[in-house]
Image: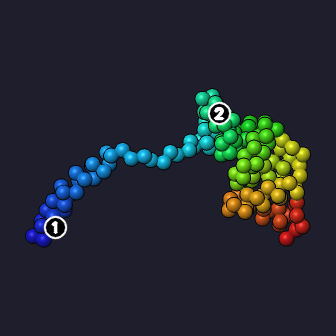
């Protein structure tokens, strides 16, 4: 008998509450806009989606540091290192942690620029200071190998 009353009480509650949930769900309140997924655009562009590449280039050209970094990754994945380096510089100049890390990686490997462990170390430091995990990892490797800094 308790199960029946319990089920009935749940149904009555649902009937009372449901209309207010429906009304709340249909009201139009301003919502925060979300940034495009630039990494997804970069991957689509890499697979040959010219529309994704155009979107990525437009966002990068408008000054979006995230898009600039993603466009750099697109060019790097196509072995166009000088162009990738250019976009990493723009992204890093705005303090974007992933862009700083990618710029450090380009310096570290001499991709699009002469190899320079000191510059790599400096950019890894900036990225790591923002808590970017890959930057922290690369900074640790630079310390461990004594590249751009005394070995530690």
Q: Judge by depth and name the residue closer to the eye, 24 or 71.
A: 24
Q: Secondary structure at mark 2?
A: helix
Q: Is residue 130 visible?
A: yes
> Which residue appears at 88% of the width and 60% of the height?
148
Neighbor class of circle 2 (other Cα within 10 Å; few <14, some 14-19, many 20+) is some
Quadrant position of the C terminus in the picture: bottom right
**Residue 38 horizontal/vertical position (percent):** 61, 42
> Which residue appears at 72% of the width and 49% of the height?
94
Q: Secondary structure at mark 1?
A: helix
Q: How many marks?
A: 2
Neighbor class of circle 1 (other Cα within 10 Å; few <14, some 14-19, many 20+) is few
> Which residue appears at 67% of the width and 34% of the height?
57
**C-beta proximity under 8 Å, tags 2 and 1:** no
> Residue 46 appears in which quarter of the rendering?
top right
- Mark carried by residue 6: 1
Horizontal side of 26 relative to 89 (left or right) equals left
Upstream in the sequence, badge 2 or badge 1?
1
**Residue 77 horizontal/vertical position (percent):** 73, 40
Q: CA distance from mark 2 to mark 1?
A: 58 Å
**Residue 19 horizontal/vertical position (percent):** 22, 51
Quadrant position of the N terminus in the picture: bottom left
**Residue 17 horizontal/vertical position (percent):** 22, 57
Q: Judge by depth and name the residue closer to the eye, 27 or 78.
A: 27
Horizontal side of 4 relative to 126 (left or right) equals left
- Identity of the residue furthest to the left in this view: 1
Q: Decide: is 124 above or below 115.
A: below
> Residue 35 appears in which quarter of the rendering?
top right
Horizontal side of 25 relative to 152 (left or right) equals left
Q: Is residue 45 visible?
A: no
Q: Which residue is mark 2?
A: 58
């Amino acid at each position: 008998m308790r199960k029946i009353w319990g089920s009935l009480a749940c149904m009555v509650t649902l009937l009372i509450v449901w209309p207010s949930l429906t009304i709340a769900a249909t009201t139009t309140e301003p919502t925060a806009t979300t940034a495009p997924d630039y990494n997804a655009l970069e991957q689509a562009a890499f697979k040959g989606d010219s529309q994704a590449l155009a979107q990525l280039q437009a966002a990068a050209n408008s000054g979006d540091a995230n898009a600039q970094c993603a466009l750099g990754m697109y060019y790097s994945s196509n072995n166009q290192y000088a162009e990738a380096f250019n976009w990493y510089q723009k992204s890093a100049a705005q303090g974007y942690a992933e862009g700083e890390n990618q710029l450090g990686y380009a310096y570290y490997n001499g991709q699009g620029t002469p190899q320079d462990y000191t510059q790599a170390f400096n950019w890894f430091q900036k990225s790591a200071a923002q808590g970017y995990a890959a930057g922290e990892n690369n900074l640790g490797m630079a310390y461990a190998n004594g590249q751009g800094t005394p070995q530690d």
